[in-house]
Amino acid sequence: KAGVTQTPRYLIKTRGQQVTLSCSPISGHRSVSWYQQTPGQGLQFLFEYFSETQRNKGNFPGRFSGRQFSNSRSEMNVSTLELGDSALYLCASSLQNPNTEAFFGQGTRLTVV
Amino acid sequence: AQSVTQLGSHVSVSEGALVLLRCNYSSSVPPYLFWYVQYPNQGLQLLLKYTTGATLVKGINGFEAEFKKSETSFHLTKPSAHMSDAAEYFCAVSVANQAGTALIFGKGTTLSVSS
C-alpha cells in the first residue's frame, strides 16, 4: 500500500513568487491536512480538506490556500512568497478525519530567497 | 482551546536507560492524544494514540504512554533506549467526535541516545 506522496521534495523560490505543492493521499483516504513546520513555530495547522471541501482552517494569511480534487489529491498554494514562508510543508491523510490516524508524507522543503 | 506543552526541548539518555518524554495538554473536552516521531528529513510517524478506554497505551518500537486525566498528562516512556530511538518526538491533541478537527502539536522533544 503506497504511502502519502508529496511533490516536489525540495523547492527554492524567490520572494514575491508563488508556489504550488502537491499531495497524493493513501488510496481510500478522503481527509487531507496540511501543516507548516519551522524551527521557531514548530508544527502549525494550515487547513484540512474532505471530499473537496475545506472543513477546517488554521490561522494563516489568505496568501495560503488549498484545494482538493475528486480523487482526493490535494494542492496548496502560497502566493507572494515571503522569506518567513521558508519551511517544511507536511501533508497528512486520514480515512475520515485526523482523530483516527493521520499518515504523513515526507514533506516539501520550501526555501524562499 | 486545546494546547500541548512538552517539557524539555532536549533529552539525553544512555543506551539501555529509561526514556521519559513529558507531555501535558489542555482541553475542555475529552481529548484524543497522540505521540509522533520524526527522523531527520522525514515526515511524522505515529507511535501510539489514546482515544478512549484503557489509559495505558502501548505503541510501536516498545514505547508506551499513560493518560492521566487528573494530571492532564500523557508522558511517553520506553524501558530501555536504543540508538535508533534518537529522533524528535511530538505530542499532539485532537478533540473527540468533531469532524474536521486539526492536530495541535507540542514544540517537540529531541531525544539523543549515547552509547
Image: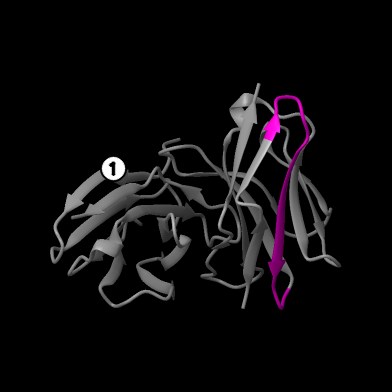
Give the image quarter of residue B113: top right
In the displayed structure image, the side of residue A31 where residue A73 appears, left or right: left
Q: In the image, residue B112 lies at what x, y percent?
A: 61, 35
Q: How many marks?
A: 1
Report if residue A113 is visible in the image. yes
For label 1, the residue is A9
Q: In the image, residue B49 lies at what x, y percent?
A: 68, 51
> Front-most of A24 and A78?
A78
In the displayed structure image, the side of residue A90 where residue B70 appears, left or right: right
Is B65 rendered above or below residue B18? below
Residue at the location (50% across, 48% down)? Answer: A103
Find out whether residue A111 is within the magenta segment.
no
Callout 1 secondary element: loop
Residue at the location (30% across, 67% down)? Answer: A66
**Rendered-image quadrant of the C terminus of chain A:** bottom left
Report if residue A69 is visible in the image. no
> Front-most of A101 and B33?
B33
Q: Label 1 amino acid? A: Arg
Residue at the location (60% across, 51% down)? Answer: B9
> Front-most of B88 and A22?
B88
Give the image quarter of residue A4: top left
Q: What's the magenta region? A: B13-29
Q: Chain of mark 1?
A: A
